[in-house]
Amino acid sequence: MAGVFEVEVDGVEHDHGLGHHDEPHQFDVSKLSPEEKWRVEHAKMHAKHKGHEAMHAEMVLILIVTLVVAQLVLVQWKQRHPKSYNLVTLFQMWVVPLYFTTKLHWWRFLTTWFIFSVITAYISYRATRKPLACTTPRLVYKWFLLLYKISYATGIVGYSVVMFTLFGINLIFRIKPEDAMDFGVSLLFYGLYYGVLGRDFAEMCADFMASTVGYYSASGMPTKHLSDNICAVCGQPILVDVSEEGIIENTYRLSCNHVFHEFCIRGWCIVGKKQMCPYCKEKVDLKRMFSNPWERPHVMYGQLLDWLRYLVAWQPVIIGFVQGINYILGLE
């Protein structure tokens, strides 16, 4: 291991080793320990940015102004043209992480991304066909609800591992802090990313299927009259009475008195992000629907994913735009 290395910063020589020499000498960086490499890079960074305080202030100001303007533009876009906003956001959610992970050679993520893309592409294809097969709505909601639960569990496990690492519990199992933290952050990223992406694809499929079934219209009146024994989400008959206990699933009645398969209405509200009756558009009381306290976190988790969408889809684009402005203005 190299015992002594020196870095010259603006004519001032800094000794980062065990002794001091009058003349600087060259050293092999590959022979340094990780801590020594970090100290060398730290010294170089100080040398590069010394005396640039005014430039740094300009860069921070540009970043703040760009974030504020971008937020206003995105809010207006979402309010005026929600369909195009959702499609562009979904595309960026799908592509932007792929670019960075390919560049960083994160093969585990690329493998899971490929599997997710293949299955979701098939499910989305089924959901957009006309006429809609009678088994498609339940297939779609089964897949996205399963994905939603997996992402939820993965995110919880990842968050727990991170917290255990911060409290030093990993040392009981003789696991290095950096390894435990890397594992926890990776699980948290997987859970949040696929949770956000799955909900966006589910919302798109829910719109296509509901409009094809005919009992739901995003604007205006439905094209079909809903009978008492038909589920407006999947268009299939309801075989179990509301007061009866079903073998596979129960039947759920909303406050507007329309009845649905429990699985369908849960998928419609949680996964498809539709907090209203598919037929009459009366607002659904999610707290009453999910009276079990163990199910309520799923609703809060869905709200968290909606907020994180901005960070995953638009934050890299905004930061790239800021870097472009700094480059044009000659700020480094």
Image: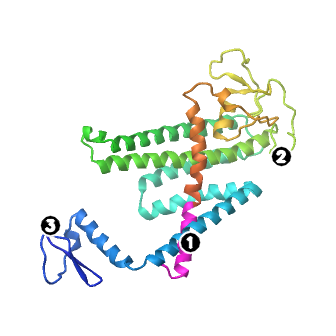
User: Residue 208, relative to residue 106: is it above or below?
Assistant: above
Q: Which residues are magenta?
A: 315-331
Residue pictured at 47% horizontal, 74% vertical: 56
| Residue shown at the point (47%, 49%) measured from the top left | 189
- On residue 62, the disc is 1
Tag 2 near tag 1, CB within 8 Å: no
Report x, y in % for residue 245.
Answer: 66, 15
Residue at mark 2: 219
Of mark 3 and mark 2, the one earlier in the sequence is 3
Q: Kindly indicate the quadrant of the structure image that contains residue 325.
A: bottom right
Q: Are marks 3 and 2 in contact (CB under 8 Å)?
A: no
In the figure, 58 relative to 236: above or below?
below
Rendered image quadrant of residue 281: top right
Q: Earlier in the sequence, mark 2 or mark 1?
A: 1
Structural crowding at the residue carrying mark 2, measured as other residues with C-alpha within 10 Å and reported as few (<14), some (14–19) or many (≥20)? few
State yes or no: discs 3 and 1 in contact (Cβ < 8 Å): no
Q: Secondary structure at mark 3?
A: loop
Q: Which mark is residue 1?
A: 3
Q: Tell me the kind of residue under disc 3.
A: Met
Distance in Å between CA atoms under marks 2 and 1? 41 Å
Disc 2, SS: loop
> Amino acid under label 1?
Ile
Distance between the Cα atoms at labels 3 and 2?
A: 71 Å
Name the residue: 57% across, 30% down. 295
Residue depicted at 41% across the width and 49% down the height: 185
**Front of the two marks 3 and 1:** 1
Q: Is residue 329 shown in magenta?
A: yes
Q: Main secondary structure of the magenta part?
A: helix
* Colour style of the rendered protein structure: rainbow
Q: Is residue 239 visible?
A: yes
